[in-house]
Amino acid sequence: MPRLVMKFGGTSVADLERIRNAAARVKREVDNGYEVAVIVSAMSGKTNELVGWVRDAANPPGANAPGLYDAREYDAVVASGEQVTAGLMALTLQELGVPARSWLGWQVPVRTTNAHGAARIEEIETANLDRKFDEGLHAVIAGFQGVGPDGRITTLGRGGSDTTAVAFAAALGAERCDIYTDVDGVYTTDPRITPKARKLDRIAYEEMLELASLGAKVLQTRSVELAMRYKVRLQVLSSFEDLPGTLVCDEEEIMESNVVSGVAYSRDEAKMTLISVADRPGIAAAIFGALSDAAINVDMIVQNISEEGRTDMTFSLAVDDVPRASQALENAKTAGTINYRELEADPDVAKVSIVGIGMRSHTGVARKMFAALAADGVNIKVITTSEIKVSVLIDRKYLELAVQSLHDAFELEKAP
């Protein structure tokens, strides 16, 4: 029998009524002749509640400083959210006449690295699942979790259930991986900003990966990376409406596409500039080495060298990381690892990007983007490009205007 992986996010299983709705969708696919593996997230809001409990336990009232908690016990606590949902989903399927049982990550098992709270899947052993499929049982699997080399429960980090679903689709040789969520597909941009945004029938892995990494919240970045690596066909669907979704697939499966497929944005960005950096070999490595050691993820990087020989280094990062980045750079300066005259931070910027595989074969895309922004008075602070994307850093107050301007300029409301 063909196999299908169906993943339901937190809003799709937020209460028993929504679990029943999701189970009815699973039954429909079972009736269509599929062996189904269902991947579930914790009920909406439950993971945040569990994380809060961990922090409160590690920082009781009257404590002088926030407690450092055992990451292994953190995983043991937060993984319980998916365990509850998996059991409830299995019970609901049984009531609908679908033979099913629940599986936790360690029962499958899902082998992961030992990085508690941010583990990566190394292997999924499917022998146990295969035997139960042969017996006519369908699987309900707790997402977001696995078991480390030491036998302890691990979790994959936020959004890890998407990664779990794709990994199981690859391991089981599934025909497709359906991701059910509270939106009905992937749009050309955020419909809350641009009402003319159009739902895409299909999008290439590379485009989806860029959109996810640039701020689109529909799919978790690691899940798209995994799907592209193992050629898992992904479909994004609504849990609440019977509407066609968006298929994420190989570029060869897409007959026609616009030059630009979508506009992504990230609101919570900041820009930092080191002014008059000492110009010597290895200075860039020293600067970004200090940031890396402080676990700061840097995105856009621009180096400017003036006629006077002055070198300025500008980069973007998450706005919440500005204090830690400033401290890391000041520490490196004090230690003599790097030298600069001044450090400037601008926490009020946003990143806007256009993405499309059509850029490979069309010229003038960047020019059109910059002209559209200029026409609406949007000043560009930093630019980065790749083969299928152009990203700019702008003042945050112009974010919505920029998104709308670019969506109109590339006529994304029109189908190819």
Image (cartoon, rainbow, N blue to C red):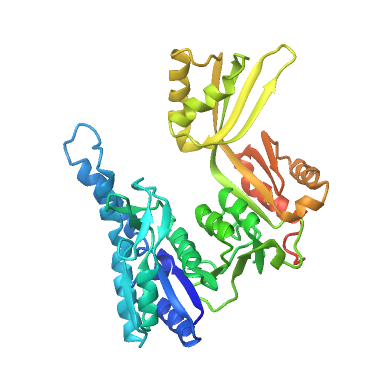
Q: Is residue 228 left or right of residue 106?
A: right
Count of all numbered marks drawn on residues in the image: 0
Q: Is residue 114 left or right of residue 228?
A: left
Answer above or below: position of 31 versus 281.
below
Inspect this view and state whether residue 42 appears: yes
Q: Residue at x 71, y 64 (%)?
A: 252
Q: What is the x, y in percent for residue 77?
A: 26, 54
Q: Nearer the viewer, residue 349 or 117?
A: 117
Q: Is residue 253 left or right of residue 96?
A: right
Q: Nearer the viewer, residue 384 or 178?
A: 178
Q: What is the x, y in percent for residue 166?
A: 49, 63
Q: Determine which quarter of the picture holds residue 313.
A: top right
Q: Nearer the viewer, residue 332 or 374?
A: 332
Report the residue that reaches farthest toward the left: 62
Question: Where the C terminus falls, by quadrant?
Answer: bottom right
Q: What is the x, y in percent for residue 259?
A: 77, 56
Q: What is the x, y in percent for residue 357?
A: 72, 55
Inspect this view and state whether residue 181 appears: no
Q: Determine which quarter of the picture holds residue 199.
A: bottom right
Q: Residue at x 44, y 56 (%)?
A: 159
Q: Residue at x 44, y 14 (%)?
A: 335
Answer above or below: position of 348 versus 357.
above
